[in-house]
Image (cartoon, rainbow, N blue to C red):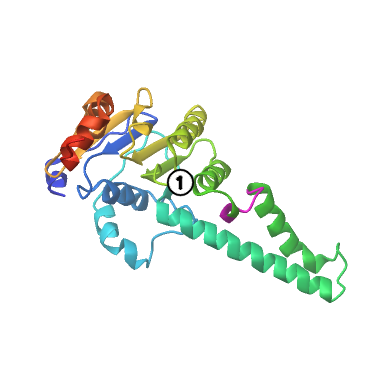
Amino acid sequence: MTWLHNTDEIVFNRPLTFMVGDNGVGKSTLIQAIAISNQIPQLTNQMYENDPEYENISQLANCLKSHWDVKSKRGFFFRADDFISFVRKNKKLRKELETELALLDEKGIDKLAFERQPFQNSLTVLKRSYPKELDKLSHGQSFLALFKSRLAPNSLYILDEPETPLSPQNQLSLLYMIDEQIKQGSQFIIASHSPILTAYPNADIYHIKHDDISLIEYEEIENVAFMKHFMTDPQRFMHYTFERDN
């Protein structure tokens, strides 16, 4: 991450800012450090203390200094791994609650008994937040259901390649949710390779290279330029890639 030594500040003036660039240039490291530095919890509501996975990134986070117009600790930091973990945690918790209620049923405990309430209330919250069990939905559907359930106004959301589990159509659905939250005062910082997500109007786009970070226009994103070029003549690309004569 040589570019860090050449950078004094990164300004997030827009409700939505994208970080783009090749793998390995530090996009994910940067946004994770921003989340840690500003105490934005992970999707699972966990913080980062004593988590060896974030030990090196925490060292970078300690070097960052943020200046806010309006500070908020609401929101979350998202990675694909966090999503999978959250689904598993949700499934495990739901099963545990249902098991506890079943045991109380076996004991003949009345449906309105006080000792049932903690389990019943928690299960009701889960069912209200996620009408269908997340693990029974498709990957993309479950992500969108989870994402929608966790959004709140005036929050900061830091997302690392959220397009990973999503089809192109579902990426547009995600953008719609993001836009609705922006209208309610939320801000998003997103590392992405998606030509669909990064097309959002009036977003700032930072291009990170090994030795530099700079604001660019949508048309200057390498992935966008490549996809436009590819889609003009896919068969030509296939021919030269695989050197086939027919």
Residue 46 or 195: which is nearer the viewer?
195
Residue 32 or 95: which is nearer the viewer?
95
Seen at 52% across and 29% down, the residue is 180
| Image x and y of residue 129, in percent | 64, 48
Q: Residues within 10 Å of mark 1 (few under 14, many from 20)?
A: some
| Image x and y of residue 150, in percent | 55, 45
Seen at 33% across and 67% down, the residue is 52
Of all residues, the one furthest to the front in this rendering is 246
Q: Amino acid at mark 1?
A: Lys
The reply, left or right, for residue 156 in relation to residue 33 is right
Q: Is residue 132 magenta?
A: yes
The reply, left or right, for residue 20 in relation to residue 151 is left
The reply, left or right, for residue 60 in relation to residue 138 is left
> Label 1 belongs to which residue?
73
Q: Is residue 213 visible?
A: no
Range drawn in magenta: 130-135
Residue 107 or 88: which is nearer the viewer?
88
Query: In this picture, is 240 found above or below 43?
Result: above
Query: In this picture, is 42 found above or below 68?
Result: below
Seen at 27% across and 48% down, the residue is 30
